Amino acid sequence: MNHVLFKLRQRREPQNLSSTLVGCSAILMLSIMFACLSSAYSMPMAAQTAEGNVAHGKDVYDKFCLKCHAPDQENEGPKLRGVFGSRAATISRFNYSEALKDSKITWDEKSLNRWLADPDGFIADTDMKSHVESAMDRNDIIAYLKTLK
Ligand code: HEC
């Protein structure tokens, strides 16, 4: 009996060792994969919060702004291609309000954010009456507007 047991153990040992090795390398590979994945994902995520998510910005724009603002065509509102970085009421032949024409502001992140949050509060008597409640949506829309060059 003892002899058989010994033989069995002997036979198993190398097997155990190799399955331990397989287990170890699987864990190692998983942790390497995890490390790679998390570093790959954390970079764009950090960039996203700072600069806004362009794809989501376009979605929100298409839903809420497009009906008045085609990027390249006057509509109920002026076209908006090139608006980022430009002086208010200058990029289009749209019939802007005196209020916007007199505002002399330049469209950057800060002014666009205030404008989209509350157009009339930012520039009294403007003709734009729509606003965007969510700060994240505003940030993403602005990121999208920047791509309309
Ligand atoms: C119901 C129509 C309407 C909607 C919806 C609307 N706008 Fe406007 N927007 C206007 C009008 C009208 C003006 C011109 C305001 C003025 O002359 O006082 C304007 C002006 C602007 C300007 C200034 C353009 C320039 O040349 O100085 C920006 C930027 C702008 N809108 C962005 C947006 C964004 C982004 C959205 C979507 C979140 C949006 N608007 C939704 C009607 C609209």
Image (cartoon, rainbow, N blue to C red):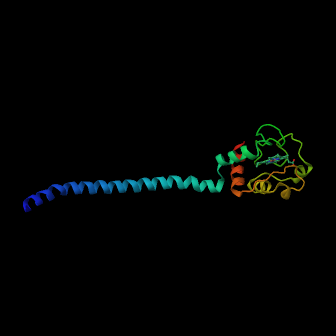
Q: Quadrant of the C terminus?
A: top right
2 vs 27, nearest the viewer? 2
Residue drawn at (68%, 51%) of the image: 140
Picture quarter containing residue 11? bottom left
Percent position of residue 68, x then y: 80, 42
Residue drawn at (90%, 48%) of the image: 97
Q: Quadrant of the N terminus?
A: bottom left
Percent position of residue 8, x then y: 14, 57
Label total for image: 0
Residue drawn at (80%, 41%) of the image: 79
Picture quarter containing residue 117? bottom right
2 vs 101, nearest the viewer? 2
Instruction: From the viewer's perspective, tell me whether residue 69 is left or right of residue 25.
Output: right
Residue extending farthest to the top is: 73
Residue drawn at (88%, 52%) of the image: 126
Percent position of residue 104, x then y: 86, 53
Residue extending farthest to the bottom is: 2
- Image vertical order of residue 140 relative to residue 68, above or below: below
Percent position of residue 31, x then y: 40, 57
Instruction: From the viewer's perspective, tell me whether residue 32 is left or right of residue 121.
Output: left
Residue extending farthest to the right is: 98
